[in-house]
Image (tube, rainbow, N blue to C red):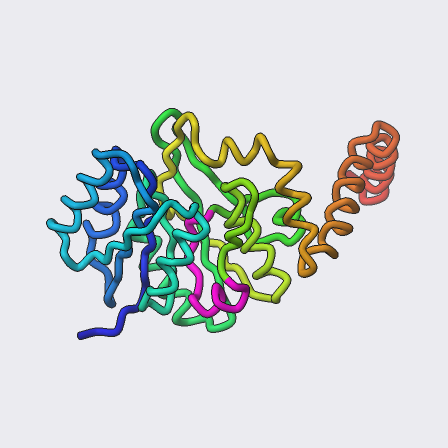
Amino acid sequence: MEDIKLSVIIPCYNLGLYLEEAVESVISFVVVGAIELILVNDGSTDKNTLRVIKTIKTKYPDIRVIHQDNQGLAKARNNGIAIAKGTYIIPLDADNKLRSVFISESIAILDTYTEVQVVYGNAEYFGTKSGLMGVLPFDVEELVLNNYIDACACFRKTAWEAVGGYDEQMPIMGFEDWDMWLRMMVKGFQFRYVDCVFFDYRAREGSMLSNAWEHRTMLLDYMFSKPSLQHLSYYRRCVLENRQLKEEPSFKYLIGVLVKKLKRRLGF
């Protein structure tokens, strides 16, 4: 039996309506190396969700299923990753879908570049919204300001261990991934962006992320008050002030004058 190279972790709380699509997106293709799929039932109370989980386990007996009391997304992911046998980890939300290129590209990069700890790419919207969810190559300034790297990224299990996993004490769920990326960044871990669609992101009303955005200020205060991230709070303020300054009319005018002078000097 081959060693397990990568584990896909799917936490699920009452999302049985979409769960089969998420599972099928992982197991419907073949890649080189063994892939493990772990489904974490985070105390679902919806009868349809429980039925779907039972059906999936019957249809795909190799899928590992964890049943736990409702403990939240961070705990569900952590519990799944803790028992994962894979060297690499991909968390997949129960309402999204994975693309085969994500797994193959991530394994290839992490196998080749030992200094890289996290691999991420773009997503395609579906559901109530369509189009490309394009992201950016890794940028410290941008990550401090915005959560632009989705939770659906591939990382080494050792990197997750090094930062203590997802923060299970977050007051509101939704920014656990951002918080962990920041803690990995200050550890000096390298991120690798691939300009390719890695997964399909379901846009829908009432999602966890939309609720987190309503409490964004409180969550930012919580995250950046951590000892390991406190210095980023000052850096964040400086970046915001600098960007605001660049929007000032006087600054824009000065830049415009300098550009014109430079063009004249260069003969344009």
Q: Residue at x 78, y 32 (%)?
A: 247
Q: Which residues are magenta?
A: 151-164
| Res 195 visible | no
Question: Vertically, is 225 above or below 160?
Answer: above
Q: Is residue 180 left or right of residue 259?
A: left
Reply yes or no: does residue 211 show up in magenta.
no
Nearer to me, 3 or 53: 53
Residue placed at 46% from the left, 37% from the top? 133
Q: Is residue 160 left or right of residue 197?
A: right
| Residue 160 within the segment the image draws in magenta | yes
* Residue under the image location 31 percent in, 36 percent down: 14
Residue at the left extreme, as displayed: 59
Residue 125, how many percent across, how many down? 39, 34
Q: Quadrant of residue 251?
A: top right
Which quarter of the figure is the N terminus placed in?
bottom left
Q: Nearer the viewer, residue 176 or 140?
A: 176
Residue 62 screen position, x and y as percent? 17, 59
The quarter of the rendered structure image containing the C terminus is: top right
Q: Could you tell me residue 182's position as x and y percent?
A: 60, 55
Foreground residue among 166 and 260: 166
